[in-house]
Image: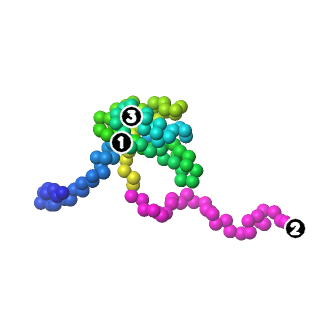
Amino acid sequence: MWLAEGGRLWTIKSNANTHKMEKKLYIGNLAWTTTTESLKAAFSKAGEVVDAIVMTEKMSGRSRGFGFVTMATDEATDAAIAMWNEQDLEGRNLVVNRARPKTDTPMGAPRRDFGGRGNDRGGDRGADRGFRRDY
């Protein structure tokens, strides 16, 4: 889409996912025992749930303590926030917010450096601290 303003042409990007993201909720502070099914059942009390997922660790399959719920309508989204934000589910007070798009951080991007020596310790790992083995 183009917009002419003051003799200049501006490009306006239309993102089809923007409207979808408005109906997607971030659910934080989930109990470790909360499953996708129990999360979906809880949020269905506020309206129709299109999708729900509890994020899990890849290796262990254990909950990471947060998930996402996509509601069918804007009204259901607002009702779910009002009903569940800072409310108890399975012994934990939930944090419910509208989900934000993931930032465009490329895979393999360098991590922040907090100083220190990192993993390169050098040396012979202990000889300089008086640990000697005589065998």
Q: For the C terminus, which image quadrant?
A: bottom right
Secondary structure beneath dot 2 equals loop
| Residue displayed at 83% across by 65% down | 132
- Where is residue 105 shown, x and y percent of the image? 42, 59
Stretch of the chain drawn in magenta: 104-133
Q: Which mark is residue 2?
A: none
Name which of mark 3 and mark 1 comes first in the sequence.
Answer: 3
- Quarter of image, res 87: top left
Q: Position of residue 34 (x, y in %)?
A: 51, 38
User: Percent from the top left, x then y, of residue 2?
Assistant: 17, 58
**Residue 41 in the figure: left or right of residue 123:** left
Between residues 10 and 61, which one lies in front from this camera angle? 61
Residue at 27% over, 53% down: 15
Q: Amino acid at mark 2?
A: Asp
Q: Main secondary structure of the magenta part?
A: loop
What residue do we see at 67% from left, 65% from top?
121
Toward which corner of the image does residue 127 lie, by quadrant?
bottom right
Q: Earlier in the sequence, mark 2 or mark 3?
A: 3
Horizontal arrangement in the rendering, residue 119 relative to residue 99 (left or right):
right
Rendering colour mode: rainbow
Label 1: how many Cα within 10 Å (few below 14, some 14–19, many 20+): some
* Residue position for label 2: 134
Which residue in the protein does label 1 denote?
A: 50
For the residues labelled 3 and 1, the Cα–Cα distance comes to: 9 Å
Give the residue type that dot 1 points to: Val
The stretch drawn in magenta includes residue 115: yes
Residue that carries the numbered disc 3 in the rendered image: 44
